[in-house]
Amino acid sequence: MTQRKSLVKRIFLHSRKFVLNLLETSSVHGFQHIVQGGVHVVERIFWISCITLGVFGMIALAQRIWFRYQTSPVVISMDRNMYFWNTSFPSVTVCSRHRIDDQKVEQYIQQHPETFATEDDKEDFKEFITKLANATYDTFLDLPMHKTYGIPTTQYLNLIHNLSLAFHPQISSGTLLPLLGQQTITELGVCLSVNSIVAEYSSYQYWSSDRWDLLPSPITAVVHPLDGEVYGQLVKLENSYEVYFHGYMEIPEISKRRYLFLEAFYTTVELLALELITSPSARQLAVSQRQCRFTHEADVLEFSPVYSYNLCRIECRMRLAVRYCGCIPHFYRSRDVLITLREGNKSVQCNCLPNCDDSNFFVQAYRSREWFLGANLQWGFTEYPKMQLQRDIIFGLSDVFVYIGGLGGFFLGCSLLTCTEFVYFLIWRLFKLTNDNHRN
């Protein structure tokens, strides 16, 4: 028992000596006054209080600095050197108002004589398939659902695809890069997207093949002020049509502005552009820091292997449809996981972040004139953007170290060398003190 008390006393004395030595030699202001001999107890309490307040203030402000770095380290700045960048050529999605091929419908009726026994059945089916192909959120109530001829809702999209009217207008451009068209399924039905890198992920062929892989991105058209006036053109549209103008990394969605143009008119649309580009340094940040997503960052989506702001909003509407009616419209991609989206009375949280690289186009003017060769559409720039927005880092990790180092110097008068001193004392001096004790 006596040896154990002696050992404890020896450890206590050595530890006390070690702590006193550490505080006496530390460069942190105030530590020396705490252990200095001949100091009144009130003075010691005063210096301990000052050091405690300094540590608290440093930690509190350091947390705010770290929170700023984690949530808002980027800034959107303005660049006006218009000759230093290329501008994405505006993408369009064109939806024809006449979508069903009457001959295909007649053939379908002839192939199912047991279903369409009377002329009224035939006429009712023609009305049903026409309204189904043009169904949107605005026209769902117009669907004659009292008689669907035994066609399951899961086959609606296949039926529309098989009976649809071929829609392949000629596409041309005034640029060296070709404008590529892709059939895509939208909230307005089956449409044609031009100059888009995400439209194929919403195509009937991609969905029917049950594909979820990433595709090689097609080359999109870009223009420069030195190119002069550049227009894209769709020739022989043949029917009246609706048009969305959007960026190459987006798809149309029902809440965005769309334009209706009539057949037998040649329409020219002049657009203005505003682009937002993310710098290479900002690309390295986490999604929560830059508050935007790139096309390949689609881990938050259940129904698309690529991300865009509109795709996220569309999936949010799908979740709302499941919540309120237990089903989704036929123009959305169905999946077995859909049943798990029913969340009872819980609210549906969209949490859709904007695209990191985004192109916005605004219709400046359009004009139409009668045209004897059918409906034609021409769109492009007459005036190039004089401003581009750039998302860049304004508060990086180096700034965090500088600010926290400044706080340490302001509140405690310490620096990086002070941290080195603590490491030195805690490792080397403690190790040396332990060896001395073993020798004794």
Image (cartoon, rainbow, N blue to C red):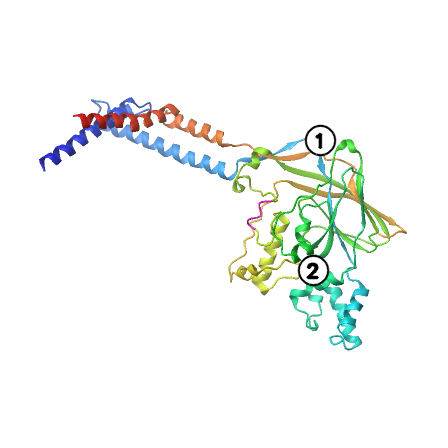
Please tell me whether residue 56 is drawn above or below residue 329 in the rendered image.
Answer: above
Number of callouts in the render? 2
Front-most of 346 and 112? Answer: 112
Q: Quadrant of the C terminus?
A: top left
Q: Is residue 194 in view? A: yes
Residue 433: image x %, image y %?
23, 26
Task: Identify residue for label 2.
Answer: 136
For label 1, the crowd category at 10 Å Cα-Cα, with few meaning under 14, some 14 to 19 and many 20 or more, is some
Give the residue pinned by disc 1. 82
Residue range in magenta is 296-300
Q: Is residue 285 left or right of residue 156?
A: left
Tell me if residue 336 comes above or below residue 222 in the rendering: below
Question: Up-down: is 196 above or below 101?
Answer: above
Magenta-drawn stretch, dominant element (helix, strand or loop):
loop
Say which quarter of the image contains residue 296: top right
Q: Is residue 269 visible?
A: no
**Disc 2 + disc 1, Cβ < 8 Å:** no
- Relative placement, left or right, of 404 versus 86 is left
Q: Is residue 407 left or right of residue 112?
A: left
Q: Is residue 259 above or below residue 62?
A: below
Look at the image and tell me in which quarter the N terminus lies.
top left
Closer to the camera in the image, 69 or 249: 249
Q: Residue furthest left?
A: 2
Does the magenta portion include 299? Answer: yes
For the residues labelled 2 and 1, the Cα–Cα distance comes to: 40 Å
**Residue 74 pos. (x, y %):** 55, 35
Mark 2 or 1 closer to N-term? 1
Q: Disc 2 residue type? A: Thr
